[in-house]
Amino acid sequence: MLRIAIFASGNGSNAENIIRHFNFSDRGAQVALVVSNRTDAGVLDRATRLGVPAQVLTRGDFNSPDHLLPMLQRYGIDFIVLAGFLMMIPEWLIKEYKHRIVNIHPSLLPKFGGKGMYGINVHKAVVAARETQTGITVHYVSEQYDEGEIIFQASVPLRPSDTPEDVEKKIHQLEANHFPIAIEKIIAGL
Ligand code: GRF
């Protein structure tokens, strides 16, 4: 049974969908750990409610191989999913988990990626650019923000009247429909 850690900084709706997908049926993998950098992240309550251990790390602990690696080993983590995680992943972790860390970005990369492009900022930029569609991108994590190899994309049409909040709702729906299944497929190919 492959063991997944989810890293998340915020609300955690993606984390919850992924946990529900893997932990309550036999899909060859399970979410064994949730890691956050914020004590007030909604994802922590969701993890607890769903019976998944959660750990909060300070920036120092997160960036220390002496702390993070033994912790991941203790939980037997084989694969890492970033779901709304707002800290830069250290290079040594990327090397240690080569092709075993994936991120979801709420746009059709390479559009609307890079520094500052997270959360509602992405959707504001999409609306300002009068895009007729947007979407989600699942990609491997490389040393640069949002620049790793793209694994999967799905798109959704936009109306001229859509606000950034409307776009956000559409994106969350798209993520719920596709992200857990995309992870299952990636893991099946390992
Ligand atoms: C998602 O839109 C994800 O694509 C992005 O951050 C958001 C996190 O939402 N990277 P949630 O915390 O999973 O609800």
Image (cartoon, rainbow, N blue to C red):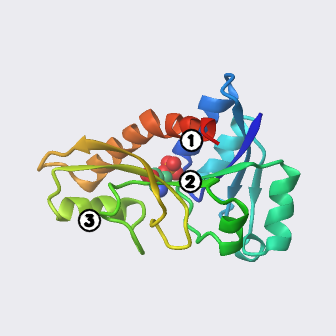
Label 2: element kind: strand
| Viewer-proximal residue among 33 and 142 | 142
Label 1 SS = helix
For the residues labelled 1 and 3, the Cα–Cα distance comes to 30 Å
The circle on residue 73 is none
Among the 4 quarters of the image, the one containing residue 108: bottom left
In this view, 24 is above or below 180: above
CA separation in Å, label 1 and label 2 = 9 Å
Q: Pick the residue in front: 52 or 151.
A: 151
| Other residues around mark 1 within 10 Å, as few (<14) / some (14–19) / many (≥20) | some
Q: Label 1 amino acid?
A: Ile
Report the residue at 24% width, 60% height from top. 126
Q: Split into 4 quadrants, where in the image is the C terminus?
A: top right
Q: Which residue is mark 1?
A: 186
Q: Residue at x 26, y 65 (%)?
A: 125
Q: Which residue is mark 2?
A: 102
Which residue is under mark 3? 125
